[in-house]
């Protein structure tokens, strides 16, 4: 296999106009792989460290020149000459070179960009698609797209307390059909908002950010849009929410200013129970704070038999934390974000661990994204059956949807759309 000849990093921009890192790994055979790293806004405090320069004279302190330097000057000399197909070995070497628990020395952004472009370079050299390189012959499940069409929380400037309201077109026969169902509903929703004289401006992930405060109002709008677009709510298109509750948690209570309420863990659980009775909700992400495992335990005991309870901030794609969540029955699914942990190998390990504990896994984008569609390939490679990558109307999000369309076409009759089976409890 090809040997690593040269590694180059550079500073580019993400979808929020903030700097991020891009890396190219060139092999001696002439093939190369390129990858860009995304960036979160509602980040978990146990995430691997995203290295930023803090030099206020450049990009208001958000530059990533230090991470670029670490790749070009520290990582590259160590990796040059190595066989690029030894992904897990090289990923472990990267962890060793860093030497810290949270990749704070070299930066998880620097390390991940190398890890991802390494995988891509090898796939290029082998002449096979990235998903096939990462997943082999088993990789054939096209995920149900969880489409975040109403944004709130720290991703939007509206009063909605909950961060994401998602369409789940799980009744489709193929990914392409699921995407079309979601897109039609998205455009119908836009018309509906206009009719109601509500704003059609969008949040960070391309979902609308109307000036509404209650989750019920958002969910009603979605139900109405689904029906108006000609689909059956629940049966054909279900709903999901990422509450991102770490952002709402202060001194043991959940502050919901948009709704005009401050709720205890028990009251919030009751509220979720009612929402799930009244709406076809199939998944709740981060319903409680990363600092409130008791809340997670409570809701999983109450609703975990019916719907997916997904841990994002609380688990941060970290195998150790996922193990803890399985043992303690904190939730029954895990959100998977490459940059929360920092290498491709550890991300795959996190998913495998989740499966062994009978957890579901959902591959996810970040609110600050790039044109890189790595996660689309990853979702098929690992047969997760579910992906969330925003609304279908901004290029950094459609890049992932479009890549999934290509993969489905490439797999032909071998493709299997996840549908309800991968989502339903
Ligand atoms: O909370 C989340 O799940 C993500 C992605 O939707 O947001 P962020 O990237 O801001 O952490
Ligand atoms: Mg989340």
Image: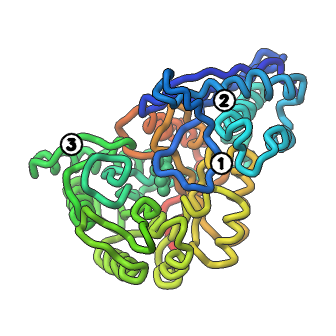
Does residue 153 appear left or right of residue 252 in this picture?
A: left
Q: Residue 64 carries which label?
A: none
Please, is residue 278 above or below residue 411 in the view? below
Label 3 to label 1: alpha-carbon separation: 35 Å
Q: Quadrant of residue 27?
A: top right
* Res 226 seen here: no
> Going 42% across and 56% down the picture, which residue do you hit?
172
Residue 325: percent from the left, percent from the top?
64, 71
Relative placement, left or right, of 344 versus 142 is right
The residue singled out by tag 2 in the image is 67
**Is the shortest distance between ligand 1 and the CB of mark 2 under 8 Å?**
no
Q: Which mark is residue 48?
A: 1
| Earlier residue among tags 2 and 3 | 2
Label 1 Cα neighbours within 10 Å, binned few <14 / some 14-19 / many ≥20 = many
In the rendered image, residue 353, in percent from the top left (x then y), is placed at 72, 63
Label 2 or label 1, whichever comes before in sequence order: 1
Callout 1: SS: loop
State the separation of the CA atoms marked 2 and 1: 14 Å
Residue at 78 percent of width and 29 percent of height: 126
Tell me the mark number nearer the camera, choosing from 2 and 3. Answer: 2
Seen in the picture, residue 242 relative to 266 is either above or below; the reply is above
Helix or strand or loop: what does disc 3 sit on? loop
Q: Where is residue 337 in the image (x, y as percent from the top left)?
A: 59, 49
Closer to us: 50 or 241: 50
Q: Mark 3 points at which residue?
A: 200
Question: Is residue 167 or residue 407 the one in the foreground?
Answer: 167
């Amino acid at each position: 296999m090809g040997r690593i000849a040269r590694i180059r990093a550079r500073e580019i921009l993400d979808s929020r106009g903030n700097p991020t890192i891009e890396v190219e790994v060139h092999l001696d055979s002439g093939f190369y792989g390129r990858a860009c790293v995304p960036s979160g806004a509602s980040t978990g405090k146990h995430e691997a460290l995203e290295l930023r320069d803090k030099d206020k004279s450049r990009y208001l302190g958000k530059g990533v020149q230090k991470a670029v330097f670490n790749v070009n000057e520290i990582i590259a000399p160590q990796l040059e000459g190595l066989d690029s197909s030894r992904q897990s070995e090289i990923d472990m070497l990267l962890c060793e070179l860093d030497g810290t628990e949270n990749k704070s020395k070299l930066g998880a952004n620097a390390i991940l960009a190398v890890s991802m472009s390494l995988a891509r370079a090898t796939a290029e050299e082998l002449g096979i698609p990235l998903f096939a390189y990462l997943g082999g012959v088993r990789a054939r499940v096209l995920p149900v797209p969880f489409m975040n069409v109403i944004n709130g929380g720290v991703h939007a400037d509206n009063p909605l307390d909950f961060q994401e309201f998602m369409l789940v077109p799980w009744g489709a026969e193929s990914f392409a059909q699921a995407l079309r169902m979601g897109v039609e509903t998205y455009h119908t929703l836009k018309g509906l908002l206009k009719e109601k004289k509500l704003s059609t401006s969008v949040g960070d992930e391309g979902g609308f950010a109307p000036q509404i405060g209650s989750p019920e109002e958002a969910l009603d709008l979605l139900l109405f849009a689904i029906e108006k677009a000609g689909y059956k709510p629940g049966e054909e298109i279900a709903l999901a929410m990422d509450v991102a509750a770490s952002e709402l948690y202060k001194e043991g209570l959940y502050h919901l200013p948009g709704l005009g309420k401050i709720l205890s863990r028990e009251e919030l659980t009751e509220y979720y129970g009612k929402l799930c009775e009244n709406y076809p909700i199939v998944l709740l992400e981060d319903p409680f704070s990363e600092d409130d495992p008791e809340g997670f335990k409570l809701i999983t005991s109450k609703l975990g038999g019916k719907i997916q309870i997904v841990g994002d901030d609380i688990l941060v794609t970290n195998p150790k934390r996922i193990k803890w969540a399985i043992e303690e029955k904190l939730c029954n699914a895990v959100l998977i974000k490459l940059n929360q942990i920092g290498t491709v190998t550890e991300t795959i390990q996190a998913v495998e661990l989740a499966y062994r504990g009978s957890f579901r896994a959902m591959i996810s984008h970040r609110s600050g994204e790039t044109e890189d569609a790595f996660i689309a390939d990853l979702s098929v490679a690992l047969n997760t059956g579910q992906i969330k990558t925003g609304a279908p109307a901004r290029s950094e999000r459609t890049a992932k949807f479009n890549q999934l369309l290509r993969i489905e076409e490439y797999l032909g009759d071998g493709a299997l759309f996840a549908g309800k089976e991968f989502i339903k409890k």
